[in-house]
Amino acid sequence: MAIDLPGHLTSPDPPGGYLESIRALLATLPASIDDVIGYSLGGRIALSLIQLAPDRFRTATILSAHPGLRDPSLRAQRRLADQVWIRLLREHGLDAFVTAWEQQPLFRTQARLAPELLAQQRARRLSHRPDGLACVLERLGLGEMPSTWDALADYRGQLNWIIGSEDRRFQAIAHTVLAQRPATRLMVLEAVGHNPLLEAPERVLAAVSFQLIQSRDAPRAV
């Protein structure tokens, strides 16, 4: 089951603070859902679901996501940085926001993608509501997210981590996760940047499918 994140497209805005919003999302998931997959913000939300309900999920597959900032001063700095994006959305609108967002160095590898693919991505971004995205940044931003590092170390399910070989920052994060939790299955996609879903969708599908098949007969976390 694929869901639109809170504040995206027509989904309702996050109902409250970070943990309140994650609890609300957890309450809406059918009991049959025991695998969770997420990219970027979706990956952070997946990690927070594991933190709140570690025995609920058999597997978690995380793509290019941050487990959270441990240092309160870094969280405060991130909140200030996100305020710049929030003001851009509310004062200048979605088009200006998307243009600035796409120019971040994090996405530099996407410049080599086909123009029609980038146009499709831009159209998807422009289909969001500016107030919804501003609310997401205020309530679900990295600066608002409680650290999930300890929960990751204790998670007894199968944890898969996917990153691009050209995404140096998130490679470092992934290797820190691996050092803390050696059972993590790390997959590095060559010649891929921050967004494997956009840059290498077939390889992501193959990797995720393989891992889910591998975990099918694995004992459920208890």
Image: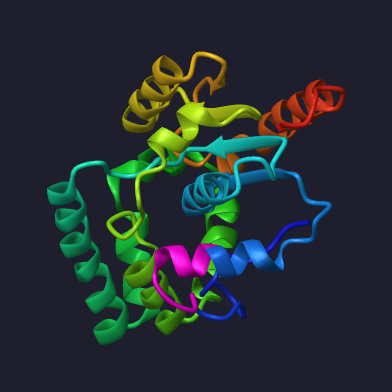
Please give the name of the residue rendered at 47% of the width and 48% of the height, measured from the top-left corner.
Answer: 44
The verdict on residue 16 being magenta is yes
The verdict on residue 62 being magenta is no
Left or right position of 121 against 91: right
Q: Quadrant of residue 6?
A: bottom right
Left or right position of 104 against 45: left
Please give the name of the residue rendered at 60% of the width and 41% of the height, measured from the top-left corner.
Answer: 54
Q: Is residue 220 above or below residue 3?
A: above
Residue ranking furthest to the right: 217
Please give the name of the residue rendered at 75% of the width and 45% of the height, measured from the top-left corner.
Answer: 34
Q: Is residue 7 above or below residue 57?
A: below
Q: Which of 29 and 154 is in front in this view?
A: 154
Please give the name of the residue rendered at 41% of the width and 83% of the height, measured from the top-left corner.
Answer: 131
Number of numbered discs present?
0
Left or right position of 189 against 143: right
Answer whether residue 113 is visible to the viewer in this image.
yes
Query: Over which residues does the magenta segment extend?
Result: 14-22
Q: Nearer the viewer, residue 119 or 201?
A: 201
In the image, residue 137 lies at what x, y percent? Answer: 35, 68
Answer whether residue 192 is visible to the viewer in this image.
no
Quadrant in which the N terminus appears: bottom right
Q: Which of 116 and 198 is in front in this view?
A: 198
Q: In this view, does 88 lie above or below 36?
A: below
Left or right position of 183 against 19: right
Q: In which quarter of the image is residue 159?
A: top right
Quadrant in which the C terminus appears: top right
Q: How is the image coloured?
A: rainbow
Q: In this view, does 127 lie above or below 105?
A: below
In the image, residue 36 lies at what x, y percent? Answer: 67, 45
Q: Nearer the viewer, residue 89 or 13?
A: 13
